[in-house]
Amino acid sequence: MEKITAEDLLRRYAAGCRDFQRILIEYADLSGVELQNIDLGHAKFRYVNLSSTNLRSCNLIGSEFCYCNLRNANIESCFFECAWFLDCDLGGINTRICELTSTRFIRVNLQDAKLSGSGEEPCEFWDVIRPDGKFIPGFTYVIYPAPSPDKVNGEDIPF
């Protein structure tokens, strides 16, 4: 694992480098920057501000985000297979066209997020705030329960 600074990442990105696999970035501000189409597979982010960052079409397979702010980051078309989000703010993200197989969301804020990615294995959620703002305690694979077959719009169906 190579530890790099945000400045080094941005310098190398501007020089055309797109391979940043297995890097470690800690205590950095990358808010609002352009990082589209790069390989961040198995990268580790600790206390990094990635809010409003463009990460569109990135490889984030096996990456770990701990105590990170990704609020309103553009993550469309990313590969998050087996990624971890621990104590992160993911408010306002859009997972459209994302591969989310076995992605783990632990104590994250998903308020106002648009969760629509796909994957062969389900995501895991622990103690999350759903896109509608409701807190879901404990572990689940499904943050929105299926509607009850004997209810319509939350009302009991009369028999």
Image (spheres, helix red, strand yellow):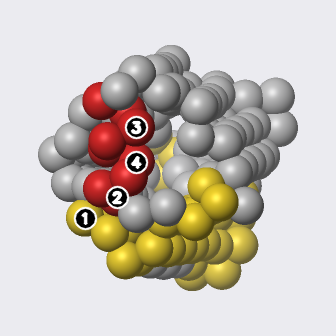
- State the residue position of label 4: 9
Q: Estimate the x, y position of residue 89 in percent, counting from the top left.
A: 35, 66
The N terminus lies in quadrant: bottom right
User: Is label 4 in contact with label 3 (beta carbons under 8 Å)?
Assistant: yes
Would residue 74 be seen by someone viewing this image from the given angle?
no
Mark with earlier residue (2, 1): 2
Q: In terms of secondary structure, where does tag 3 sit?
A: helix
Determine the CA span between mark 4 and mark 3.
Answer: 5 Å
Determine the CA span between mark 4 and mark 1.
Answer: 11 Å
Q: Estimate the x, y position of residue 34 in percent, counting from the top left.
A: 25, 33
Q: Residues within 10 Å of mark 3 (few under 14, many from 20)?
A: some
Q: Residues within 10 Å of mark 1 (few under 14, many from 20)?
A: some
User: Is label 4 in contact with label 1 (beta carbons under 8 Å)?
Assistant: no
- State the residue position of label 3: 12
Would residue 15 be seen by someone viewing this image from the given angle?
yes
Residue 29 is labelled as 1
Left or right: residue 56 versus residue 45 is: left
User: Is label 2 in contact with label 1 (beta carbons under 8 Å)?
Assistant: yes
